[in-house]
């Protein structure tokens, strides 16, 4: 019984080390999304931090702020979703698809 417990503890430690390494790697991974046919562009990392943000001046119309707000909201939400998907996909490779609460 002790052998099995030691083996299980060793596996848990290995998974913890792999997850820590992955977490550092994900901080450097970046992806870019856009909305409005590329008029709004966002670059985001694996920590869901926006790194770059650009708005094409053609979509800036002072008389139609609502449309610009909608484009920005769409781009931000898409960037966050894609970043979360990237993290989830990378984590599932380590955890074998197990969902571990509180991780990422």
Image: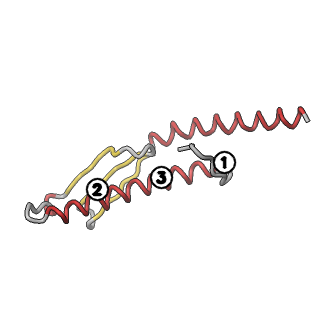
User: On the rendered structure, is 57 left or right of 73?
Assistant: left
Q: Residue at x 59, y 48 (%)?
A: 91
Q: Position of residue 99 (x, y in %)?
A: 63, 51
What's the residue at 52%, 49% (across, down)?
A: 87
Residue extending furthest toward the front: 101
Rounded to the nearest angstrom, the CA distance separating label 3 from label 2 is: 18 Å
- Is 47 drawn above or below residue 76 in the view shown? above
Q: Is residue 69 left or right of residue 83?
A: left
Tag 3 near tag 2, CB within 8 Å: no
Residue extending furthest toward the left: 63
Q: Position of residue 20 (x, y in %)?
A: 58, 35
Give how far apart the Cα atoms at labels 2 and 1 are: 32 Å
Sequence-earlier tag: 2 or 1: 2
Q: Tell me, for residue 52, which label it has, or none.
A: none
Which quadrant of the figure has residue 63? bottom left
Label 3 environment density (alpha carbons within 10 Å; few <14, some 14–19, many ≥20): some
For label 3, the residue is 84
Residue in the image at 68% along x and 52% along y: 96
Secondary structure under tag 3 reads helix
Across and down, in percent, residue 94 comes to 64, 46
Q: Is residue 69 left or right of residue 61?
A: right
**Rendered residue at 65%/54% (across/down):** 97
List the residue tagged with mark 2. Answer: 41
Please state the total of marks drawn on the protein image. 3
3 or 2: tag closer to the N-terminus: 2
Question: Mark 3 against mark 2, which lies toward the viewer?
Answer: 3
Q: Earlier in the sequence, mark 1 or mark 3?
A: 3
Cα distance in 3D space between marks 1 and 3: 16 Å
Q: Quadrant of residue 66?
A: bottom left
CB under 8 Å between discs 2 and 1 = no
* Residue 22 screen position, x and y as percent: 56, 40
Q: Which residue is mark 1?
A: 95
């Amino acid at each position: 019984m002790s052998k099995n417990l030691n083996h299980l503890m060793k596996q848990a430690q290995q998974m913890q080390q792999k997850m820590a390494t992955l977490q550092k790697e994900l901080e450097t991974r970046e992806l870019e999304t856009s909305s409005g046919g590329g008029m709004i562009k966002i670059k985001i990392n694996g920590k869901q931090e926006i790194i770059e943000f650009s708005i094409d001046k053609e979509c800036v119309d002072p008389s139609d702020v609502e449309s610009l707000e909608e484009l920005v909201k769409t781009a931000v939400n898409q960037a966050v979703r894609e970043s979360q998907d990237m993290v989830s996909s990378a984590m599932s490779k380590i955890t074998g698809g197990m969902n571990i609460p509180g991780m990422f």
